[in-house]
């Protein structure tokens, strides 16, 4: 039995539900269902939506104090502590948590969400801050990053990095797969760096019976959808309806060039309901989307290539059917039980070593 203190952000009212929160929520659900763990959870999320600069600072300060209080409250009961955070939390939260764990003599494991850990180390910190962070991280038993490529990009700086992928656990509802795709889906924060403009332009080249539906938090003006008759904005998908909504579509579009892209949860979810993915060749996305296996890879910032890929799937039903099978197979590789089992063995060995 491993008594684990898991620190990280869970979805809350008053804040956006992004990939980081869903990833941590999935991990917490797995912990709570696994008889080999006694989990203690500290939620680091704070209500920042629509807050002023002063309001955000106050919320950050208040929640920071609350998090540290709850960490201290649980420390005597646990064997291992796991901090789940974005790169910003490595600066704001890690030093404080690390100091507490040294006092209480508890081992710390860090999991970094997102795909920008390498760029953060190289350009997001002053030289002195970078050196301090690397010293703290180098002393840990393990640091978990999202992709194998990201691990390789920093292994000259840290020799204790391992991959721990995003996971999801959803299944397709009863809608049968079509012979040809007609219903395309954009499922992400709706902003330029996520490729919404490329997706909209490509939608204008589709046959009349094809549509593009868009789900996600709006970070653009609604007028951006004007003059795209095949496209419609459908709002923000409730987390409990993701499987149902995705199962109503045929192909996911993910033409992102967002700097922090790692293993996008939307791609994993799409795979698990059997949606091939048209994705940009950006950061480590091609580690997840394999061209002609579970989707099609296109150049970033190139709507004509997105259009060509969409129309290729419409015109080649045999390829589309093959990609459905590849997507389902890939989706199973990102289920919690498979991915977190390796983590379980690692945490067990850390617990033994610390006793």
Image: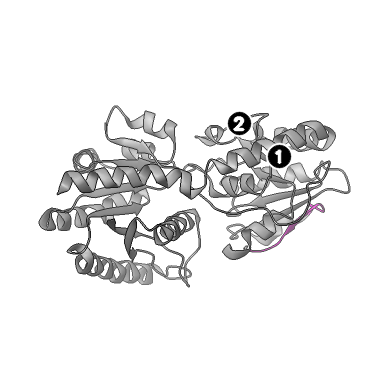
Measured Cα–Cα span from mark 2 to mark 1:
12 Å
- Looking at the rendered image, the disc whose residue lies closer to the viewer, 2 or 1, is 1
Q: Earlier in the sequence, mark 2 or mark 1?
A: 2
Screen quadrant of the N terminus: bottom left
Q: Which mark is residue 290?
A: 2
Query: In percent of the image, x 80 and y 32: which residue is there?
Result: 318
Residue 193 as seen in the image, left or right of residue 214: left
Q: Is residue 117 above or below residue 18?
A: above
- For the residue pair 40 and 227, the one nearer the viewer reads as 40
- For the residue pair 272 and 316, the one nearer the viewer reads as 272
Look at mark 1 in the image and give the residue it sits on: 324
Query: In percent of the image, x 29 and y 47: which residue is there?
Result: 347
- The picture places residue 263, in percent across and down from the top left corner, at 50, 42
- For residue 254: magenta? no
- The picture places residue 8, in percent across and down from the top left corner, at 36, 59
Characterize the local packing of mark 1: few (<14), some (14-19) or many (20 or more) Cα atoms within 10 angstroms: many
**Visible residue check, residue 124:** no
Q: Is residue 245 above or below residue 272?
A: below
Residues in magenta, as a range: 227-236
Q: Which mark is residue 113?
A: none
- The picture places residue 148, in percent across and down from the top left corner, at 43, 33
Residue 166 as seen in the image, left or right of residue 267: left
Residue farthest left in this picture:
103
SS category of the residue bearing label 2? loop
- The picture places residue 308, in percent across and down from the top left corner, at 76, 33
Q: Is residue 57 above or below residue 260?
A: below
């Amino acid at each position: 039995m491993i008594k684990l203190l898991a620190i990280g952000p869970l979805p809350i009212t008053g804040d956006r539900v992004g990939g980081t929160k869903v990833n941590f929520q999935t991990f917490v659900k797995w912990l709570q269902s696994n008889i080999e763990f006694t989990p203690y959870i500290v939620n680091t999320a704070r209500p920042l939506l629509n807050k002023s600069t002063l309001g955000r600072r106050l919320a950050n300060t208040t929640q920071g104090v609350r998090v540290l209080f709850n960490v201290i409250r649980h420390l005597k009961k646990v064997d291992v502590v796991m901090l789940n955070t974005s790169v910003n939390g490595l600066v704001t939260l890690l030093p404080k948590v690390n100091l507490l764990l040294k006092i209480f003599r508890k081992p710390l494991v860090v999991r970094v969400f997102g795909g920008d850990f390498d760029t953060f180390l190289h350009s997001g910190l002053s030289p002195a801050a970078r050196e301090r962070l690397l010293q703290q991280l180098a002393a840990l038993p393990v640091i978990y990053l999202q992709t194998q490529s990201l691990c390789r990009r920093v292994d000259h700086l840290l020799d204790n990095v391992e991959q721990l992928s995003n996971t999801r656990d959803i299944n397709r509802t009863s809608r049968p797969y079509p012979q040809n795709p007609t219903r395309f889906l954009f499922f992400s924060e709706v902003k330029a760096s996520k490729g919404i403009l490329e997706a909209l332009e490509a939608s204008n080249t589709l046959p009349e019976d094809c549509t593009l539906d868009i789900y996600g938090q709006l970070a653009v003006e609604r007028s951006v959808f004007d003059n795209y008759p095949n496209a419609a904005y459908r709002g923000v998908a409730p987390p409990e309806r993701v499987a149902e909504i995705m199962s109503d579509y045929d192909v996911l579009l993910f033409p992102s060039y967002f700097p922090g892209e790692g293993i996008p949860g939307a791609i994993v979810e799409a795979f698990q309901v059997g949606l091939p993915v048209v994705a940009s060749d950006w950061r480590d996305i091609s580690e997840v989307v394999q061209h002609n296996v579970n989707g099609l890879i296109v150049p970033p910032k190139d709507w004509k290539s997105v259009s060509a890929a969409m129309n290729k799937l419409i015109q080649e039903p045999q390829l589309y059917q093959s990609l459905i099978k590849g997507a389902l197979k890939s989706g199973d590789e990102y289920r919690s039980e498979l991915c977190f089992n390796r983590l379980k063995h690692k945490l067990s060995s850390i617990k033994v070593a610390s006793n």
